[in-house]
Amino acid sequence: MDSFKIVAFTLAEEEYGFDIKNVQSIERVQQITRVPNAPNYVKGVINLRGNVTPVIDLRSKLNFEHTDNTDDTRVIITKYDDLELGFIVDQTKDVLDVLSKDIESASSIASNSEIFEGIAKINGRLIILLKLEELVKTSTN
């Protein structure tokens, strides 16, 4: 049976997930250096172990209302191809196994479904799976 692992996290009271194969680390929010003329969802860059890593506010990217960071706010550091990006999320939850048969298609839920992989149904939870490659494409254009 096809399965994979995801990192589950919350944004605006909903659960989302990234495929763990693209997740490098989960960090506390640190000093972010602003970048002039960047889109509003690009918070800036951080120096992470000697690498300059762009940081995207996932709330802004998905058009959610802005909230201030809390003690639970985290930056999920992802890597796609050679690009390392950090995504600010409200809270990281856990790492879960997802069976392919437990994923509903994204096209039935959203018109802009290119950034959604689908919805995973795991132990009564609904977790919206995000396509990192599409988030990276739309964040770097």
Image (cartoon, helix red, strand yellow):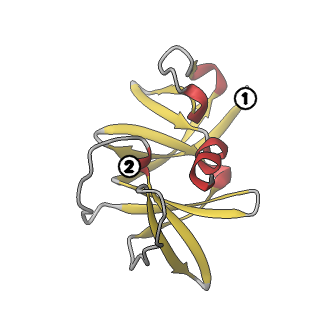
Q: Secondary structure at mark 1?
A: loop
Q: Residue at x 45, y 39 (%)?
A: 16
Within 10 Å of disc 2 (Cα), the crowding (few <14, some 14-19, many 20+) is some
Q: Percent position (x, y) of residue 109?
A: 47, 18
Q: Residue at x 41, y 56 (%)?
A: 40
Within 10 Å of disc 1 (Cα), the crowding (few <14, some 14-19, many 20+) is few
Q: Residue at x 43, y 27 (%)?
A: 123
Residue at numbered disc 2? 60
Tell me which corner region of the image, top left, top right, bottom left or bottom right, holds residue 71: bottom left
Q: Give the mark nearer the N terminus: 2 vs 1.
A: 1
> Would you say 124 lies left or right of 87 here?
left
Instruction: Give the residue type that dot 1 points to.
Output: Asp
136 and 34: which is toward the camera: 34
Q: Which mark is residue 98?
A: none
Q: Which mark is residue 2?
A: 1
Q: Secondary structure at mark 2?
A: helix
Report the Cα–Cα distance between label 2 and label 1.
Answer: 33 Å
Q: Percent position (x, y) of residue 132?
A: 62, 46
Instruction: Give the residue type that dot 2 points to.
Output: Ser
91 and 107: which is toward the camera: 107
141 and 56: which is toward the camera: 141
The residue mark sitting in front, 2 or 1, is 2
| Residue lying furthest front | 37
Q: Is residue 55 above or below residue 92?
A: below
81 and 112: which is toward the camera: 112
Q: Residue at x 62, y 55 (%)?
A: 140
